[in-house]
Amino acid sequence: MPYRNSLLGAFAPPVKRKAFFSFHFDDVMRVNNVRNAWKITHPDSASMRSFYDSSLWESKKLQGDDAVKRLIREGVCNTSAVCVLAGTNTWWRRWVRYEIACAIVDKRGLLTVHINGIKHHPKYYLFEKRAVMTLAGAQWSWERYQDYTDPVDLPRWLHDCQPGEVSILSGRASEYDYVAGDGHQNIGNWIDASAKAVGR
């Protein structure tokens, strides 16, 4: 169904473009908000979708740089434009820069869409402070907790942190002294308050 183009003053068919979305995989939750735009409803018409996603949906583990380059070139070659979905650290990703280069070499459109303003549910992981032996002796370092490696939800009582930052649990979790705080009398209240803090 043609639609009225107010700039041209004439009826014209909608142009459906294929886009290659370039992004840092750490931003995938925000990225998916953009890539799924209009999948259910279009802002103008439920029957119209003016772009198709031709980019790499999954993070693929490939052997060697040549295989990665080939996959990117194949993804870009049949598209009209490369859209860089830019988060905080997108600029330093090697393969994002290669995808931008492919847009120039293959004469595709190129645009950037900043996505830091999109609310999302980031991934959080547990870390522990461990002593790492170096030539200078033991150095303390935050290392990924090995006994539970899956992502976790941010506890309600813990403030959000910046990407790459460690939020120390002991700095936010409730803490009491059994003797000084009359634990014999109050430990039940302390446990209750802790449970209520997480909606239990």
Image (tube, rainbow, N blue to C red):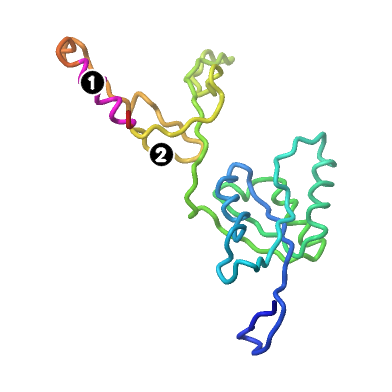
Instruction: Name the residue located 67 percent from the left edge and 88 percent from the top edge.
Output: 10
Quote the CA–CA distance across marks 1 and 2. 24 Å
Placement of 182 over or under 20, stated as above or below: above
| Camera-side residue of 89 and 133 | 89
Placement of 3 over or under 114, stated as above or below: below
Which of disc 2 and disc 1 is earlier in sequence?
A: 2
Instruction: Name the residue located 53 percent from the left edge and 30 percent from the top edge.
Output: 151
- Which kind of residue does numbered mark 2 sit on? Asp
Q: Point out which mark residue 190 bears.
A: 1
> The N terminus is located in which quarter?
bottom right
> Does 6 sit left or right of 51 as displayed?
left
Would residue 97 be counted in the magenta stretch?
no
The magenta-colored residue range is 187-198
Secondary structure category for the residue under label 2: loop
Placement of 53 over or under 142, stated as above or below: below
- Please tell me in which quadrant of the rendered image residue 86 appears: bottom right
Instruction: Name the residue located 75 percent from the left edge and 35 percent from the top edge.
Output: 61
Instruction: Name the residue located 73 percent from the left edge and 63 percent from the top edge.
Output: 81
- Please tell me in which quadrant of the rendered image residue 177 appears: top left
- Please tell me in which quadrant of the rendered image residue 63 appears: top right
- The location of residue 136, given as percent across then percent down, is 55, 15
- The location of residue 189, given as percent across then percent down, is 20, 20
Q: Residues within 10 Å of mark 2 (few under 14, many from 20)?
A: some
> Does 7 sit left or right of 54 as displayed?
left
> The C terminus is located in which quarter?
top left
Q: Residues within 10 Å of mark 1 (few under 14, many from 20)?
A: some
Q: Point out which mark residue 160 bears.
A: 2
